[in-house]
Structure formats: structure tokens, C-alpha cells
Amino acid sequence: MQFETIPGLPETKEKLINAVKTNHLAHALLFHGPEGSANLSMALALCTYLYCEQPTDTDSCGVCPSCQKMSRLVMPDMHFAFPTITKEKEDKDEDEKVNYLLNWRKFVLSQPYGNVNDFIYFNDFQKKQLNISKTAARQIIQSLSLTSFEGGYKIMIIWAAEFLHPSAANALLKIIEEPQPKTLFILITSQADKLLTTILSRTQKVMIRAFTDQEVSGYLVDQSLANGENAAQIAMLADGNLRSALRLVDQVEDQQVGKIREWFLLCYRADFKSIFGLSDGFHKLDKEAQKSLLLTGLSVLREILLKHCDLDQLLRTTNVDREFVNKISSKVLKEEHVAELYEAFNAAHYHLERNGSAKFIFTDLSMNIIRLMAKIS
């Protein structure tokens, strides 16, 4: 992973490179960004830059042996810790540890903007308790006590650091605060509030902002994943989350707002038979497609709310979608109803994440839409 492969974020890249050049890089860093941000990819790009044998002023060279090793995540002085299955007996055999690491590398290389749920599905860990255990902490300490293979940095990347068991976090406090020379800890999280304050106080925060719409759409076009028009619409729906944007590409999201229009129209007409048919169809979708439709609904509600507030300059929709927003904001949904629906959509998304019945969730949400539309129709 190189800085140039990450779309946008020039201010963060410049800050990290300057810290390396001026020798002001802290020995313990916390990369904290929202879901779908570049918190992991930015950390890996920094590691590539540190190991690069011929770095430039703006990036690693990408061709030296160290960069080639980093492109496969097989640098011998770089170690990883990540959530795994909690077991009654912590002593896993060596083959199992190797399999976990191989799967981790495959996951990161294929889904650098993925989240813990993606990792769970990738490894078929569903319905199993994950954490970074005290045994894993001991292995971290043992790995960092060894002499560097190539004489450079020894780096420990702890991904999804919010899964650190309290006993594991406490076991790492001393080595994080007083590591050996040229040892670098990088903790990566999207939920810093779940980390122990003792861990937070020993790390320097590197805030990774969400991507802008322009950065997301530019990335999709550059990677030949979407044309300009579709990329712009996907970026609007993704709202800075590159993970969501990549999933929306697979699901042909240019049709999603049309589905919301159809759904809202049926609710406005109180066409219960058709709504129940939509509920059946929603139930048959995979979980990611279900969540995607709800997120699209949230984006549409945001547009309607902006229209109510006369903030047309912030609207992202165009053409027929903009016409739909204009009509529903002026004739169907009042501002207070939009806010109430926004909460209902968020609640539906929450229950889907926790494996609630998709059919019941969709039907209940439809009844809420009908109820609020009926108040002014």
C-alpha cells in the first residue's frame, strides 16, 4: 500500500511524511477514522514509506525489495494483531496461528477499506465471540523483544483495537509507553471511545477524516468502476464511506433512489398489497443489499430535510431524483416528519445489524411512513 493508492487526504499524507522526515514520529500512534475511511490503508502506506529503501518526498518508491514485500504484507519486521475467536484454551497450535495470519493478509489485500463485519464473514466467524486476548498480548510482547531482521523499524499493527480485552490492554501498557528503540506501535480503530483511557493516553492520535464526495467519485472513475454520472450518485449515497461506495458499485446503486421513490409512492397511496409484496422482496435480498436500501433512504431524507431548510446549495441529487425531493418536501412530508422518519430508518438499520427479521423491519418502517404521510395528505 502506497500513499498514491489512497484517494485524496493530502493533508494527512503530508503530516505523516513530514513527521518521518523530521524524526518526530511518535512511537505509538492511534489511527482513528470513521467506518470506510483510510485508517488501515493510511497506516500501511506509512509503514511502506518507513521501510522503503528509496523514498521520495511524497511517497515510497514502490519498486525496491522492501516495497515489494510490503505489497504482499510479508515484511519480516512487521507484525499484526487482530480479533480472533475466543476459546476456552488459549494455546492454539502453530498451524492455526499461521492460517489466521494468511487469512488476515488476504482480507486486507482484497478489502483494505473493510470493517470487522467483513472480516467475520471472510473467515466464517459468524455467531462467534471475537477479541484480542491476553495470550495475544503476550505474543505481541514476545515478537517485539526479538532483534530486527533487517535492522530497521519493528512495527506492530493492532487492527480493530477496540476488541482488546482489558487484560490484554493492561498487559501492553508498559511496552507501549517504553518500547525498545525503533519500535512502532500502530493501533487502528473506528471506535476510539471503546479503548481504555490508559491506552489512549499513551498514543498520539492520527485523525483520518471521511472521504469527500469528489475523492470517492474520482477513485471510482480512476479505477474504472463507474462512469462519471454513476460515480457521483454513488458518492452521494456513500457519504464519505469508501467501503459503502465499493459495495454500491456491485449493487448497481443508480437504481436505489428509484426504489425509494417507488416505496414512498406506494406508502403515500397506502397500497398495502403492493407494500407487503415489497416486504417479501426486501426479505429475499442479502443483508448488505437490505442495509444499502435503508442507507439510500437515509440519504434521500437528508436531501428532503435540506430542501425544507432552503439549503439547495448542499443538495447532492440531480435530475429526476432532485425533482422527487422537491415534490415530496413541498407536498408530502413536513420537516418534523422527516426528522421522525430519519430516526425510524436509523432504528431499522440498527435492528438489521443485529439480525432482526428483515420482513418485519421493512413492514414496520412502511407503516411508519404511511402514518406520517397520512397526517398531511
Image (tube, rainbow, N blue to C red):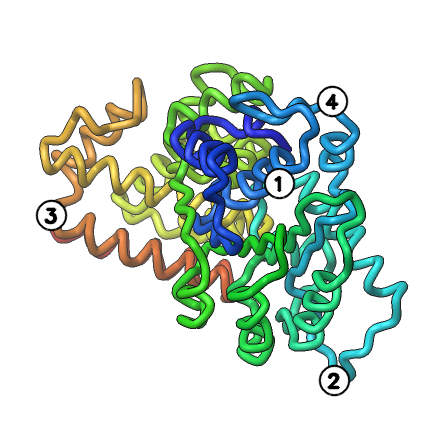
**Residue 95, image x and y in percent?**
89, 63
Question: Reading the chain from its start, which is encountered first: label 3 or label 1?
Answer: 1
Which residue has dot 4 on it? Answer: 63
Using a 10 Å C-alpha cutoff, classify the residue at mark 4 as few (fewer than 14 neighbours), some (14 to 19) or many (20 or more): few
- Residue at horizontal 34%, vertical 35%? 261
Q: Residue furthest bottom?
A: 88
The quarter of the rendered structure image containing the C terminus is top left
- Residue at horizontal 46%, vertical 54%? 190
Q: Amino acid at mark 2?
A: Glu
- Residue at horizontal 12%, vertical 34%? 330
Marks 3 and 2: in contact by CB < 8 Å?
no
Question: Reading the chain from its start, which is encountered first: label 2 or label 3?
Answer: 2
What is the distance, in whole Å, between disc 4 and disc 2 at their CAs? Answer: 45 Å
What is the distance, in whole Å, between disc 3 and disc 1 at their CAs? Answer: 58 Å
Residue 355 at least partly seen: no
What is the distance, in whole Å, between disc 4 and disc 1 at their CAs? Answer: 15 Å
Question: Reading the chain from its start, which is encountered first: label 4 or label 2?
Answer: 4
Which residue has dot 2 on it? Answer: 88
Question: Reading the chain from its start, which is encountered first: label 3 or label 4?
Answer: 4
Q: Amino acid at mark 1?
A: Cys
Which residue has dot 3 on it? Answer: 376
Q: In this rendering, which labeled residue sits more in front, label 4 or label 2? A: 4
